[in-house]
Amino acid sequence: MLTYEVLKESPKWLRAFTSLDAAEFEALLPAFDQVWQAYQREEERKRGKAYRRKSGGGRKVRLKRSEDKLVFILVYVKVYPLQEVQGQMFDLSQGQANVWIHILMPLLKAALGRKKQLPEREVHHLAETLAGSDGLDFIIDGTERRRQRPKNPLKQKEYYSSKKKAHTVKNNVIANADTQHVAYLSQTVPGKTHDKKLCDQEQYTFPALSLLEKDTGFQGYEPQGVITYQPRKKPKVGELSQGERFVNTVISSVRIVVEHVLAGIKRCRIVKDIFRNSKKNFDDLAMEIACGLHNFRNSFRHPVPMISLIEMASESYFQ
């Protein structure tokens, strides 16, 4: 049976199976234990008087300790094995693995919330959240994730992305360019939805005079009171000038940060591999947890702040 005691003997394997180092795991464990205890109390309240078996009765207990429950759900999010395989790793049946997955996923989200690592999800709180972050330099980008082909023909058309040539779901992500922290995660929508259309639907608001780097998928998106930067498209007839190509290079060198952020999110294979779970809103829950784990790891590993676009574009920088 795979346990924390086994994994912590090898830092390489602990990171490979859970995406966390030992110090990070130990820091998350108390918050996870608190939400687990709260969950147990709520379940006992719903049942009324707590039911107690006689000593030795019932099945042999699996995932008895909080650290083993946390390992179980982190392995599922990071590795994303079939539930049958997940059960074999933890000495459970497929059915038991399924039950534990659906119990522990919301608890993992709650634990990350207690550590204040989850991205903002409410649009009307977005400007306030961004204003409280380190710096006012942000990057917006859309990210698609493949999902299984829906059985319903109408949903097949809705979720089919011509760009990816597959059935996908999509989110917009707003990240802090200096800290690489995921500040906002949009709602999960069918992959056919255009990046800018999702912006128009959710109507994002930003602090005054903040900087926003975006790619050509957000052509025409100009939020009020925000300084935006976007690479210039090559015209249908002719070529970009040398100055325009230079500006595109500068913008791309800053926008690469969001690609690093998305790569950090997709270290969790549950949002990288073809999504197999069919429970309603489970794809949205998985993406929010993946963003929270990225923020949690990022807060421990102290990335070097990136040079802002203004500094890079200044004449003194290039001299």
Image (cartoon, rainbow, N blue to C red):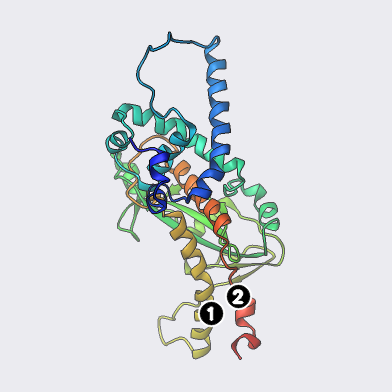
Answer whether residue 169 is visible to the viewer in this image.
no
Q: Which residue is mark 2?
A: 309
Answer whether residue 25 is visible to the viewer in this image.
yes
Q: Secondary structure at mark 1?
A: helix
Q: Quarter of the image holding residue 177?
A: bottom right
Residue 187 lies left or right of residue 137; in this view the side is left
Residue 219 lies left or right of residue 206; in this view the side is left
Q: Between marks 1 and 2, how big is the CA–CA gap?
A: 8 Å
Name the residue rendered at 55%, 9% in the picture.
Answer: 49
> Could you tell me the amino acid type at mark 1?
Val
Going from N to C along the chain, the mark reached first, 1 or 2, is 1
Name the residue rendered at 44%, 80% in the picture.
Answer: 234
Q: Position of residue 135 (x, y in %)?
A: 67, 64
| Vertical side of 29 occupied by 256: above or below | below
| Vertical side of 245 occupied by 213: above or below | above
Q: Which residue is mark 1?
A: 250
In the image, 261 versus 27, the foreground residue is 27
Q: Which numbered marker is on residue 127?
A: none
Q: Position of residue 31 (x, y in %)?
A: 58, 38
Name the residue rendered at 46%, 65% in the picture.
Answer: 259
The image quadrant where one finds the N terminus is top left
User: CB atoms at circles 1 and 2 under 8 Å apart?
Assistant: yes
Residue 267 lies left or right of residue 308; in this view the side is left
In the image, 144 versus 83, the foreground residue is 83
Q: Position of residue 195 (x, y in %)?
A: 48, 59
Q: Position of residue 179 (x, y in %)?
A: 59, 62
> Could you tell me the amino acid type at mark 2?
Leu
Circle 2 packing at 10 Å, graded few (<14), some (14-19), many (20+), is many
Q: Secondary structure at mark 2?
A: helix
The image quadrant where one finds the C terminus is bottom right
